[in-house]
Image (cartoon, grey):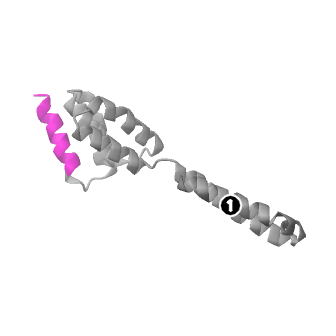
Amino acid sequence: MKSSSSYSAALYILKKNCSNFLKKSFFKRNIYFLFIFSSMLLMASSCKPSVKKYTENARQLMLEGKFEEAIPILNTAIKKNSSSHEAYNLRGAAYLELDKFEKAKKDLDKAIKLHKKDYRYFYNKGRENTGRI
């Protein structure tokens, strides 16, 4: 795993330079510590799936007709980023396919509110309106 090897490399560097670490001035030790700490934070944050990854996975499930399975993934994406208009749109589209029009309306309204420039959101909103007739 790429992040695991990066983590191992950082630990190796830390162990190798540990004896020199105590000999350095206070300022240099703090800079060194900040570098190691920020590197570890960067590696840890790169291990978590991004919202985009969640929406891509959900989109693939929806293309396969697995709308029920896509909704929990989109719920996670929205929990991670409540301003993800794409996740709201996809969840609204999934609700449309499952004939859950009230939930679809809520999500599609939110997607449009967050990002008014994407025609797909208005298209899905129109589908929601015609689905209830």
Viewer-closest of 121 and 41? 41
Instruction: Tell me: 16 left or right of 3.
Output: right
Q: Magenta region: which residues?
A: 120-133
Residue drawn at the location 64% of the way across and 56% of the way down: 7
Residue drawn at the location 54% of the way across and 56% of the way down: 2
Residue drawn at the location 15% of the way across and 41% of the way down: 126
Percent x, y of residue 25: 87, 72
Q: Amino acid at mark 1?
A: Ala
Question: Which residue is under mark 1?
Answer: 10
Residue drawn at the location 47% of the way across and 43% of the way down: 80
Is residue 75 placed above or below 10 in the rendered structure?
above
Percent x, y of residue 53: 39, 48
Secondary structure, mark 1, is: helix
* Residue 109 is at least partly visible in this image: no
Q: Quadrant of residue 100?
A: top left
Instruction: Tell me: 51 left or right of 19.
Output: left
Percent x, y of residue 132: 14, 28
